[in-house]
Amino acid sequence: MPCWGAEASPASTKAPISFRLTTRAALAALLAAALLAALALALVAAPARAGLLEPRGKQVWFGVSDTGDPAAFGQFSTAVSHHPAVIESFRTWGSDFPDSIQRWQIARARPMIHITTADSHDGHELISPQAIAEGGGDGYLVRLNKLFYAKKMRAYIRPLGEPNRCLNVYASYDCEGKLRDSSHRPYWYKLAFRRIYVIVHGGGKRRKINQRLAEAGLPPLTVAAHGLPKAPVAIVWSPLPAGSPTKPWNRPRHYWPGSKWVDWAGTDFYAGYPEWKALNGLYKRFTAAGKPFAITEWGVESGDDPSFVSRLFVWVSRHPRCKMMVYYQDFGSASSYRIQNYSASLEVLKDRLHSPLFPSFAPGAPHLPPAPPPPPGGVGAQ
C-alpha cells in the first residue's frame, strides 16, 4: 500500500523515467503476485461447487441409509451422537416416492436416491440398460428432472449402483462371470448412465437436450417435452471396487460412462470385503479429473470390527477428494448391519464424528415447514 501512495504523490513524478518504469514494472509484478495469492486463497476457502453439491473445504458429508421408518433416523443419530447430513433412500425404477420425501423432510437431511430396475415385489427386471439407453425410460427420467426442479431440492441421484455385482438385475455378468445377455453388456450400461445424466440434469430446450444426447452417442428424447429445467442434482457413479465376481472383465473401468457424464465417483465398502487395494485404485483412477468421491455405502456386518471403522476414517482423512460416506444400516433392529449391535465399532464411530470435519446439516436440506399456530383459545375452542 505505501508504494501506491508514493507513486501517486506529486514528488514521485520528478523521479527519472527509467526509475518510474522500473517502479511500475515492480508494482505490476507485485500486484499480479497478490492477485494470484488471493485467487489461491479464495479457491481454498471458497464454498463448494454448487453444481456438484460438495461440502466446503475439507469437510465430509456423513450420511445414513433410509430404512423406511422415520424413527430409525433419529435412533441412529442418537446412537452416534451426531445428525447425519445425508439420507440415502432406495427406490424402484418408475416409482413415485412421496413417503421418502416426507422422511427426508423430517430428517432435515439432503437426499441421495439409489435407483434400481428390480421390481420391489418379486424382483424381476422392469427395464434393461439397453432399453434405458434407447429412450424406453425417458418418461420416468423427465419426471425425476421436473420433480427435483419443482421442489428446488438438492439431491444426489445414484442410478444402477454396483453394476458389477452379479446379484443386481441390471448387472452385465452372472455370478459365474458369464454375460447375462446382449442388452446388459457394459456398453449399454454406460450409455444408459449417460442418458440418465443428461435428462435428469436437464437445463435447456428440447433441441439443446437432444444435442447433448447426440454428443453422448444417444438417440433424441422419446417423450413430448419443449425443454427440461435445470434440476439441482448431482449424479453419482458407484461400482464395486473389485467386482462380484472378481473377474478382469468385471472391473470398474469397464463401466465408466466418461468424465463428462459423471458428477461424483464412488463405491460401496464393507468390513466383510475390505478390498483396500481395489479401493485405492478406484479412487486414484476416477478422481484424477478432480471428481469428488463418495463411499456410497459402508458398514460393519459380520461382527464387531472397530479396527475397520477406524481404518476407514483414516483412509477418508488421507484422500481429500473423498467428500461423503454413508453408513448402510439395512432394516430392523436385528439387522446384522445395525451399528448399535456392535458396541466397540459404535464407540469408534461416535469418536470420529465429533470432528468438525463432519457438519451436521447440508445447506438447502429439505425440511417440513413449521406447524401452524393453534387457533385462538386453544385446540378445543369452538
Image: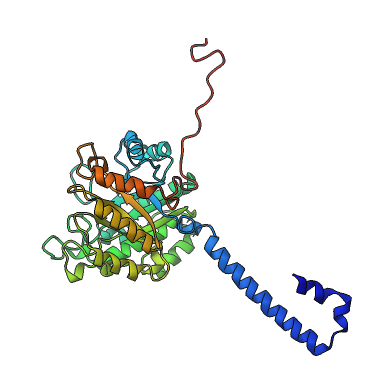
Say if residue 10 shows up in the picture: yes
In the shown orientation, is residue 288 left or right of residue 188? right
| The residue positioned farthest toward the left in the image shown | 176
Q: Nearer the viewer, residue 365 or 257?
A: 365
Which residue is painted at 47% across and 53% down in the image? 231
20 in relation to 157, above or below: below
Q: Nearer the viewer, residue 265 or 128?
A: 265
Which residue is painted at 38% across and 63% down in the image? 262
In the shown orientation, is residue 266 left or right of residue 119? right
Q: Quadrant of the N terminus?
A: bottom right
In the shown orientation, is residue 274 left or right of residue 199? left
Say if residue 257 shows up in the picture: no
Percent x, y for residue 43?
A: 54, 65
| The residue positioned farthest toward the top in the image shown | 382
Residue 178 position by quadrant: bottom left
Which residue is painted at 41% across and 65% down in the image? 291
Q: Nearer the viewer, residue 304 or 362?
A: 304
The colour mode here is rainbow
Q: Nearer the viewer, residue 110 or 45?
A: 45
56 in relation to 374, above or below: below
Percent x, y for residue 100?
A: 36, 40
Percent x, y for residue 364?
A: 49, 46
Percent x, y for residue 309?
A: 28, 53
Residue 15 position by quadrant: bottom right
